[in-house]
Image (spheres, rainbow, N blue to C red):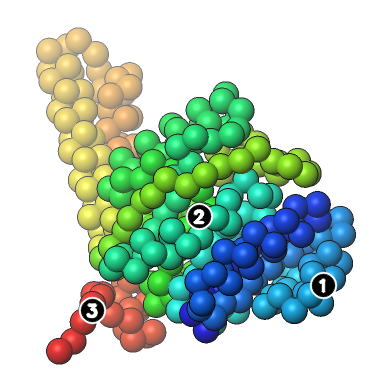
Amino acid sequence: MDISIVIPVYNEAGNLPLLVKGITRNLGSLGRSYEIIFVDDGSQDDSCAVLKELKKSNAPMKIIKLRRNFGQTQAIVAGFDNAEGDIIVTMDADLQNDPDDIPALIAKLGEGYDIVSGWRDKRKDPFFSRKLPSFCANKLISFLTGVKLHDYGCTLKAYRKDVIRNMRLYGEMHRFIPAIASFSGIKLAEMRVRHHNRGYGVSKYGISRTLMVLLDLITVKFFLSYSKNPMRLFGLVGLVSIFLGCAFFAVAIVMKCMKVLYITGNPLFYMSILLEMVGAQCILMGILGEMNVRIYYELLNKQTYSVEEKT
């Protein structure tokens, strides 16, 4: 199998016939074997029934129906787990992503890239509720991860299967795949793709989702920067806390000697005790983190490096 198209579906019955038609038209012209994997993420409409009817038209489809709504990330993971193609393309089922962009993504991947990410530079969404929060989130994600992309939220992406074969995703982390994969030193490209107004159904995402993305970003930043050496994070915080505690204690002593304020009534004295305790706890947490890292890598026989080629 050359190409797998992974599409999470949640209440998109009206869009599916046109979507399948567009995908089969574009991939059929490539002359390569392909499959379309639809993951029904607990739809409450006729999405699954529509998909089963479309499959009767001999379209190369797989239908995976989840027991309930697990979320877009887990639906994409289910698609990855069942994909047989060497190239995996993800896209939304709402027809806002254009199937006509798929051949261009695959061609770009053939230039030697491991991931090609879509960029909806002319996005057809409300400005204040969708585009503005997305713009701010993209800038923040690019800054913290060091992986510069204009549009992390675009589901239309193409991957080489070996890049994501063993990748486990949680929460809303499907949008962070390029950043997570960069941990292994992949070649990443971004290209402009079309974006359309929704034809049927309603959007399932609101501004509240941005908060969940920010929480996941903290997790991604930790794993990218400190998963192999957590002591560098916790130890640094601990040392700064201990240093500040010592400084506050010294000031409290000076104030007592100058008879400005006695220690027992000086808030700096109690703050110094608190900071010393926090510093000690952070350093102990760093030690425990280092022990867990070693257990994780050695018990599962994982490598702390990534090999691109052997000759």
Q: Name the outermost residue toward the top.
A: 260
Taking the spot 24% from the left edge, 13% from the top edge, the residue there is: 261
Q: Which residue is nearer to you in this view: 201 or 35?
A: 35
Mark 3 = which residue? 307
C-alpha distance separating marks 3 and 2: 31 Å
Taking the spot 23% from the left edge, 77% from the top edge, the residue there is: 308
Residue 228 appears at what percent x and percent y? 28, 66
Q: Which numbered tag is attached to residue 52?
A: 1
Image vertical order of residue 65 relative to residue 206, above or below: below
**Residue 152 seen from this side:** no
Residue 127 appears at what percent x and percent y? 56, 25
Mark 2 = which residue? 101
Q: Which residue is nearer to you in this view: 197 or 251?
A: 197
Image vertical order of residue 161 relative to residue 91, above or below: below
Q: Nearer the viewer, mark 1 or mark 2?
A: 2
Q: Nearer the viewer, mark 3 or mark 2?
A: 2
Q: Amino acid at mark 3?
A: Val
Q: Left or right of 77: which side holds 294?
A: left
